[in-house]
Amino acid sequence: MQSTLGEKIRHHRKEKGYSLDKLAELTQSSKSYIWELENRDTRKPSGEKLTRIARALSVTTDYLLDEKAQPDEAVVKEAFFRKFNSLDPDDQQRIQDMIEAWGKNK
């Protein structure tokens, strides 16, 4: 199944329960810009906008741009690790400590 950029944005926006307004706010865009991305194939976002959209939707930019890519577990994990890597070192350490604590309970 092939999906366009706009279809993927709309699908993941709705999956997360975001309105156009909410996604626009999260990506520092306008509501009309997000609508145009979803509904007009002629709009192509800049790399910066695409990155913000991917982060807000917890996917990767590669996934959004590849019409053949499907939202599988690997895409979700890669998006998570990109977010994790962008955290400051103290927050990364807190998350690692939580994971280790959960692992000890098994």
Image (cartoon, grey):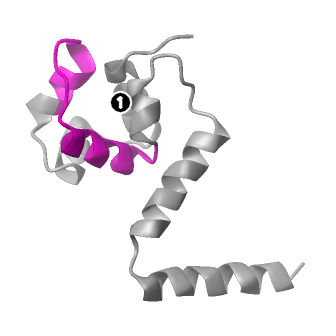
Residue flagged by tag 1: what amino acid is it?
Ile
Which percent across, then down, holds residue 92? 50, 80
Which percent across, then down, holds residue 51? 30, 45
In the rendered view, does 33 fall on the left or right side of 7?
left
Query: Quick one: which residue is furthest to the right in this view?
Result: 106
Say which quarter of the image contains residue 104.
Answer: bottom right
Which percent across, then down, holds residue 76? 57, 46
Disc 1, SS: helix
Task: Name the quadrant of the C terminus.
Answer: bottom right
Vertical comparison of 96 with 5: above or below? below
Give 12 or 63, whichever is nearer the viewer: 63
Figure disc tally: 1
Q: Residue at x 73, y 83 (%)?
A: 100
Q: Which residues are magenta?
A: 34-59
Vertical comparison of 68 with 91: above or below? above
Q: Residue at x 25, y 44 (%)?
A: 23
Q: Which residue is mark 1?
A: 9
Q: Residue at x 47, y 32 (%)?
A: 63
Vertical comparison of 85 with 39: above or below? below
Q: Is residue 29 magenta?
A: no
Task: Name the quadrant of the N terminus.
Answer: top right
Q: Is residue 53 magenta?
A: yes
In the rendered view, does 97 fall on the left or right side of 56?
right
Magenta stretch: dominant secondary structure? helix
